[in-house]
Amino acid sequence: MAGIADRIGGGDLKGVIAKNGIFIAFIAFMIAFGFGSDKFLTFDNLESVVRSSAMIGVMALGVTIVVISGNLDLSVGSMLSFGTVMVVDLHDKIGPGPAIMVMMACVLLLGAVNGFLIGYVRLNSLIVTLGMLSAIQGLTLIYSGGKNVDVDPSTQDITWFRIFGRGEIAGIDMPIIIFFVLALIIGFIVAFTPYGRRVYAVGGNPTAAVFSGIRRSRVVFSTYLVSSFCVGIASVILGSRVMGSQNNVGQGYELLVLASVILGGTSLLGGSGSILKTVIGVLILGFIQNGLLLLGYPYFAQWIVTWIVIILAVWLDVAAKRGRLLSPIA
Amino acid sequence: MSQTSVEHAPVQTANSAKGNFRWLVRHPIWAFVVIVFVFFSVMTENFFSTGNLENILVQTSTLGLIALGMTIVMINGNIDLSVGAVVALAASLTVDIMGWPVFESWGNWQILPAVLAGLASGVVLGAFNGLIVWKTGVDAFIVTLGAMLGVRGLVFVYTGEQSFFAANFAYSDFGASRFLGLPTLAWIFLVFTLLVHILLSRTVHGSNTYAVGDNREAAVNAGIRVGPHMMINFMIVGFFAALAGITLSTQMGASTPNLGRDYELWVITATVLGGTKLTGGAGNIIGTFGGVLAIGILRNGMNLMQVPAFYVLVTLGVILIAVLFLDKQLNRKGEEELRI
């Protein structure tokens, strides 16, 4: 591990900007929006932004580990639909505790299928998880018979299941606490444990990792378990907040999640990135959305801005690594 | 990766029985197409009829047209996730523009500028994606992921989240029209399939496409201008996505801002089913056509057997993974699976 000075980019200004572009962008955004709207930098507003980003954030934590290890997970969106439908449906049938456990077990099983096919059979992760995206969407519809599910309205206000989405501790909403606690735990594991270093090693140079005695298959397998675990947690938050679920509630989330991971600066090539960066990426996406709304732009303008921000962020990252702005391709 | 470039003229080896077998090994999807075709012909009364087969062609033409472009881009070693959004943009533009007061006195000719504008939007966005990939060196997956969100945002802002209805009925009549005994939309799909097949297997641009996807360094050394080459291919896929958006909106006589959602995933599924490698350098239109038909026949046949749509999704997912697995077992070249 290098010293603090190295980690923030050494002495020169260019290095600092290159290595911490996403933090600088984040602060710039906050200041710009803060000047643009006096409602933006209020505690209530900030809290509501973080709360609404928490679910995407939780999923992004797991996907970050998968991406660091050099793979992709496109199945998280339909897995979220599956988990939410299941936990909400089972809530009235077997009670909240067992419902959460059964749902977690099923979601982990789906993650294990991903992990087995990608880690042990060595199939391409993009295609496997694309296939799983479709298959899990189908499973969700089969499970629910195509109907939307909800928790019996008479129990919605008394069940302890409600704390995950609607509760608060010391005035801070529960989804935010879950997101940050999970981010701390996973961030610690990724940054400071031997397991974390193995994940980076497998993503950075698989051959070297194997030669240095790391069981690549097992590490890859485990990253998909982590990813599906995070999706399970996100399902609990979503189910508890809405107390109901549509069959396709997670449709399209896989790419939004991936967008926030990329925005944070985790490279799709694997071997680099961090949980902290992903948290920032998630928050930037949330604040872009909120800030543009407060400034009076239409809801979908955020997607256009996200388009520009993603490309600029990754471009600067790539340019900093190769030392010149434009690509040398003829 | 290096020996895959010999694959791209599969027709020549299909002479002997052994050649036939090799042909099937290279296109396992066609074995699957034949099996599901026979299966549904036997199992349902209505599947094997001219009317229904025409239906399948029309239903798959939308995905199929985009898959043609996607094949080229994927052989190039790139990918385009923005096609679904481009479908919606082109459809909305076309349906909206033909209703503009400027063109009111043009009669049926008012469709022409609208269609041209729709197609142009796809080509321009393709050029934009290609230019960014070329000049910034950012991975096409990320560039087009951003575009997927951004272009969809453009569609929602442009349409004000409204559906548009075609002002000229000739537009929707075209979607239902027939030409020489087949639906016109089926002709469009078949003719473009043939054209892109010729482009890939018989032209310099086609062999450059394989060369760039196979080994970009070598392609540069061989004097191919890789950047503009890739940009042209992004323009081609943009054109096809826009064309698909237009043909889709002629079928409905309308456009909605959510049109084409998830199409990128379906198109990639069809293309990969057809044997195109995500790592580039391998793939062809015969396989892609098979992949598109496989999805179309499966959807249509299971629908006729009154299997709920849910099972189609599960089946498709399983088949996609199975094809990938088979491909790995049959062509053991993919030993070093590349990461994205």
Image (cartoon, coloured by chain):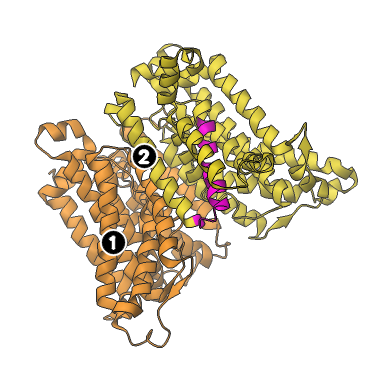
Chain colours: A orange, B yellow
Residue at position x 12%, y 39% in the image: A214
Tell me the amino acid under the disc marked 1: Cys
Q: Disc 1: which chain?
A: A
User: Which secondary structure lies at badge 2?
Assistant: helix
Q: Main secondary structure of the magenta part?
A: helix
The percent position of residue B327, horizontal first and vertical second, equals 36, 31
Residue B76 vs A152, above or below: the answer is above
The residue pinned by badge 2 equals B322
The residue pinned by badge 1 equals A106
Is A238 on the left or on the right of A247, as rendered?
Answer: left
- Discs 1 and 2 lie in a common subunit: no
Is B334 on the left or on the right of B84, as rendered?
Answer: left
The percent position of residue B102, horizontal first and vertical second, equals 84, 47
Q: Disc 2: which chain?
A: B
Tell me the amino acid under the disc marked 2: Ala
| Bounds of the magenta segment | B288-309
The percent position of residue B113, horizontal first and vertical second, equals 78, 39
Q: Residues within 10 Å of mark 2 (few under 14, many from 20)?
A: some
Residue A29 visible in the current orientation: no
Residue B196 vs B53, above or below: the answer is above
User: Which secondary structure lies at badge 1?
Assistant: helix
Q: Nearer the viewer, mark 1 or mark 2?
A: 2
Q: Is A28 included in the stretch rendered in magenta?
A: no
Q: CA distance from mark 1 to mark 2?
A: 22 Å
Residue at position x 46%, y 44% in the image: B145
Residue at position x 36%, y 68% in the image: A86
Is A58 on the left or on the right of A146, as rendered?
Answer: left
Badge number at residue A223: none
Residue A293 visible in the current orientation: yes
Residue at position x 30%, y 42% in the image: A71
Q: Quadrant of residue B161?
A: bottom right
The percent position of residue B311, horizontal first and vertical second, equals 45, 54
